Image: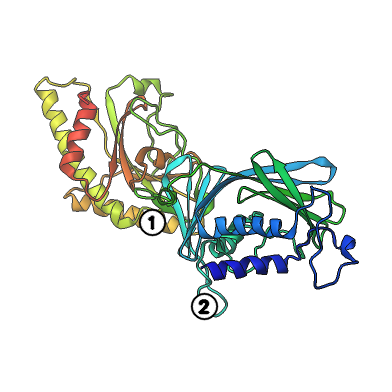
């Protein structure tokens, strides 16, 4: 490794044309002899620069690193846009790159990109790196994954940690050549600043403490548009903890689908008002709300079975069968309790209503028709006649209502009282049983929860 490391550093020094002073000051020196640094103590010598490069490249390429980075884009007229991120890298083709950008956390490794939203514990996004024109997979190292799947990050960390050849200090600039080096003296943390030019203008790079500290470059010849990258090392932490934990989350189809969940609905909360639409020729169900005071005074209870747009029809059928069987038992127990004087004579349990939260596209009605068929089959599986009248409906909302009641489950049954307040929420999964559901639903309507 020592031999490879030495070749790497020497190659970088040669390829970037590092000089101890501007080329214009060295015209009287033989071409094959290094220029001696002038007496000015602010000018860094070539060995000093090589040592700094050695330390920086070795730190990022052979050890795990974590940095807080601030990227500022300065525009004409003095306007600027600033974005902050945290980047963690475990170098090598089998390593990991983790970026925290705004509310998104992105992880690239093993040819795959995964992402989660900081304010949503229920979902994650995952995709594999695409293939090339011949159908062969591209390199699967973290830097290649991020470059293939996301917009360009104007930072040097990915190149430092994962590129095998010359370091690309900023992917937004081309033709970078260093012309001189200056010594930085900042108390106990000494370093160097490289100053050079690109195809667009001037550029500079500051290194100290074996880390990149600042990169700045013009993005147009006028110098009015430029990028500034400022880096600050983060406190050491265990790289094993940088791997995203997506256990218990459900996968969504795009990065855009990762967004804040909003407050989780709990017992006693009013159910947000939703307008249900019927499927096909079936009438639309109507849910109680606090706005209907006449209904709110009665002791009626309304079970609502919520589904996602993505819930498979087979799951819909199974869930409907279990909930229908549970409600039949609950209705019988409520009737017996009323006759025996255990429950209020006005206590009523209404029929089951279904609600599908959909995303509108060209296939939405095909998916709804499949769910409607599964809805009917679920009652048959429970040995019951399909109820007449309103049954399954659909609605559109930006509030992610199903996520807020079901969290990571595919469905949830919600018991509403006559005023539209939530009496119980029961997530439905493959392990749910009609017996367990029935016991919870009975307690919710009799007030013994």
Spatial CA span between label 1 and label 2 = 37 Å
Q: Quadrant of the C terminus?
A: top left
| Residue 248 visible | yes
Q: Is residue 3 above or below residue 220?
A: below
Residue 383: assigned label:
none
**Residue contact between numbered discs 1 and 2, judged by CB atoms under 8 Å:** no
Q: Nearer the viewer, residue 346 or 224?
A: 224
Q: Crowding at label 2, few (<14), some or many (≥20) Cα neighbours within 10 Å?
A: few
Residue 135: assigned label:
2
Element class at badge 1: helix
Give the mark count: 2
Query: Residue 446: x, y in percent?
Result: 20, 25
Is residue 294 rendered to the left or right of residue 25?
A: left
| Residue 99 visible | no
Is residue 58 rendered to the left or right of residue 326?
A: right
Is residue 225 rendered to the left or right of residue 425?
A: right
Residue identifier under label 1: 369
Q: Is residue 350 above or below residue 412?
A: above
Instruction: Tell me what residue is drawn at x 16 percent, y 50 percent.
Output: 383
């Amino acid at each position: 490794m020592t031999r490879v490391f030495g070749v790497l550093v020497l190659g970088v020094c040669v390829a970037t044309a590092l000089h101890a002073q501007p080329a214009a000051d060295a015209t009287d020196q033989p071409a094959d002899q290094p220029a001696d640094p002038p007496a000015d103590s602010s000018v860094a010598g070539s060995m000093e620069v090589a040592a700094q490069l050695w330390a920086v490249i070795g730190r990022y390429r052979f050890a795990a690193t974590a940095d807080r980075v601030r990227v500022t884009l300065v525009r004409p007229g003095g306007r600027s846009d600033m974005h902050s991120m945290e980047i963690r890298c475990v170098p090598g083709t089998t390593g990991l790159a983790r970026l925290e950008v705004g509310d998104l956390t992105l992880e690239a490794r093993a040819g795959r990109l995964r992402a989660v939203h900081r304010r949503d514990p229920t979902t994650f996004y995952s995709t594999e790196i695409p293939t090339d024109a011949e159908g062969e997979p591209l390199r699967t190292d973290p830097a290649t994954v991020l470059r293939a799947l996301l917009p360009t990050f104007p930072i040097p960390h990915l190149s430092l940690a994962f590129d095998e050849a010359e370091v690309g200090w900023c992917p937004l600039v081309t033709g970078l050549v260093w012309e001189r080096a200056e010594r930085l003296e900042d108390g106990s943390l000494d370093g160097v600043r490289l100053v050079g030019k690109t195809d667009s203008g001037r550029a500079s790079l500051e290194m100290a403490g074996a880390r990149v500290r600042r990169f700045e470059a013009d993005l147009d010849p006028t110098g009015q548009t430029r990028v500034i990258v400022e880096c600050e090392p983060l406190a050491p932490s265990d790289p094993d903890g940088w791997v995203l934990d997506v256990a218990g989350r459900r996968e969504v189809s795009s990065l855009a689908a990762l967004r804040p969940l909003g407050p989780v609905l709990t017992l006693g909360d009013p159910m947000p008002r939703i307008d249900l639409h019927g499927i096909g020729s079936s009438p639309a169900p109507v849910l109680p709300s606090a706005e209907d005071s006449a209904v709110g005074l009665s002791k009626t209870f309304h079970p609502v079975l919520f589904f996602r747009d993505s819930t498979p029809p087979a799951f819909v059928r199974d869930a409907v069968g279990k909930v229908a069987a549970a409600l039949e038992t609950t209705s019988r127990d409520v009737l017996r309790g009323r006759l025996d004087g255990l429950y209020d004579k006005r206590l009523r349990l209404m029929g089951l209503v279904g609600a599908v939260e959909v995303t509108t596209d060209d296939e939405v009605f095909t998916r709804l028709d499949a769910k409607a068929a599964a809805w009917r089959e679920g009652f048959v599986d429970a040995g019951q006649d399909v109820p007449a009248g309103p049954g399954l409906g659909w609605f559109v909302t930006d509030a992610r209502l199903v996520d807020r009641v079901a969290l990571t489950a595919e469905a949830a049954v919600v018991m509403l009282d006559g005023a539209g307040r939530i009496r119980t929420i029961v997530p439905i999964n493959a392990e749910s049983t009609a017996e367990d559901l029935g016991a919870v639903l009975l307690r919710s309507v009799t007030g013994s929860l």
